[in-house]
Amino acid sequence: MTAPDAAVLRCEREGAVLTLRLNRPEALNALNGELCAALLRELDAAAADPSVRCVVLAGAGRAFCAGQDLRDPAVAPGDGPRDLGEVVAARYRPLVLRLRSMPVPTLAAVGGVAAGAGAALALMCDLVLARRGASFVQAFAAIALVPDSGTTWVLPRLVGRARALGMTLLGEKLPASQAEQCGLIWKCVDDEAFDAEVGALAARLAAQPARALARTRELLDAGAAGSLEQALDAEAAAQRELGFAADYAEGVAAFAHKRAPRFTDR
Ligand code: LHQ
């Protein structure tokens, strides 16, 4: 399956797994307006397509994504001031909220450097698998901006305030192995095993009960901000919903008959 805008975003389908591959390798897959729009459109389409059960976000070439394209006329200083607030609100806010509310699990396959908003998009995915040679850069301070695209929300949640400040104020390249050690990402994988591990993990996620996984993400995000009582109430509400759903019956039947479950709910 090839998207109409294959030039900037490639849509690759393998079974129930949809890989959205940022495809501007000459600019380290930096995000311009066209790429942001294509990504949002394909994520919306995937969310509405019951045959998609896992979305992988990846990059073509040696990088995952260098963040906002600094040569994009919408942000490049030069011909006068630019309203960067408008750019983040119009392009990045919907992308971040879309990723965080996908009805299926999301996996970032970070094969190279992930910088600025590129790192933010990766960190918004449910799991991040990074090639050992990859790195994460909070590139905002180097161009005298604040972290955006949800970075100020997600970073301290993942690694705590001290590390979040260290990463954002200093903007150093954080190697994937250290990103794993400090809990920024799920796993760092040896370079030669990366593609196979991405495929295996995506296939495994696609076989999971998508609706239960999406509710789990919602509960963990809400739980981090709310009280214990709120978490208990939200868990009960979700458990009530899931208990009436087909996947629960299927999961218990599969357990009882010692067979693999076939989950279908989304
Ligand atoms: C690039 C870029 C890039 C264009 C490398 N753009 N060409 C949202 C909206 C509003 C305003 C602004 O902010 C945001 C959110 C953000 O994302 S802000 C952060 C934007 N990103 C950056 O500042 C990262 C800039 N890039 C870098 O720091 C480095 O390139 C990294 C650390 C990503 C990779 O370093 P290297 O591996 O040493 O590669 P390189 O620097 O040699 O870059 C290779 C080419 O890619 C080069 O082009 P050239 O024609 O010289 O070969 C770069 O100019 C181009 N490139 N990032 N964001």
Image (tube, helix red, strand yellow):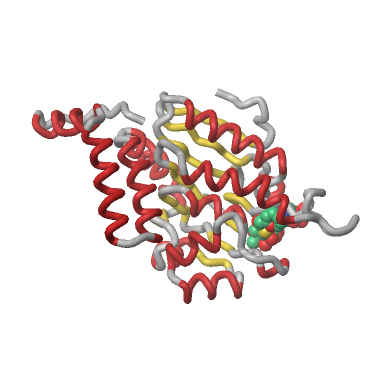
Residue in the image at 42% along x and 43% along y: 198
Q: Going by the image, does 245 lie left or right of 50?
A: left
In the image, residue 24 lies at what x, y percent? Answer: 68, 42
In the image, residue 64 lies at what x, y percent? Answer: 57, 50
Residue 179: image quadrant is: bottom left
Instruction: Using the image as rendered, state which of residue 52 and residue 221 is in the foreground.
Output: 221
In the image, residue 96 lies at what x, y percent? Answer: 55, 48
Q: Quadrant of the N terminus?
A: top right
Q: Going by the image, does 215 lie left or right of 28?
A: left
Residue in the image at 58% along x and 70% along y: 168
Residue in the image at 25% along x and 30% along y: 245
Q: Going by the image, does 106 lie left or right of 146?
A: left
Q: Is residue 231 above or below residue 15?
A: below
Q: Does residue 149 appear in this view?
A: yes
Residue 243: image quadrant is: top left
Q: Quadrant of the C terminus?
A: top left
Residue at the outermost right position: 79
**Ligand 1: quadrant of the figure:** bottom right
Residue 255: image quadrant is: top left
Tally the marks. 0
In the image, residue 17 lies at what x, y percent? Answer: 43, 32
Residue in the image at 64% along x and 64% along y: 139
Q: Does residue 177 appear in this view?
A: no
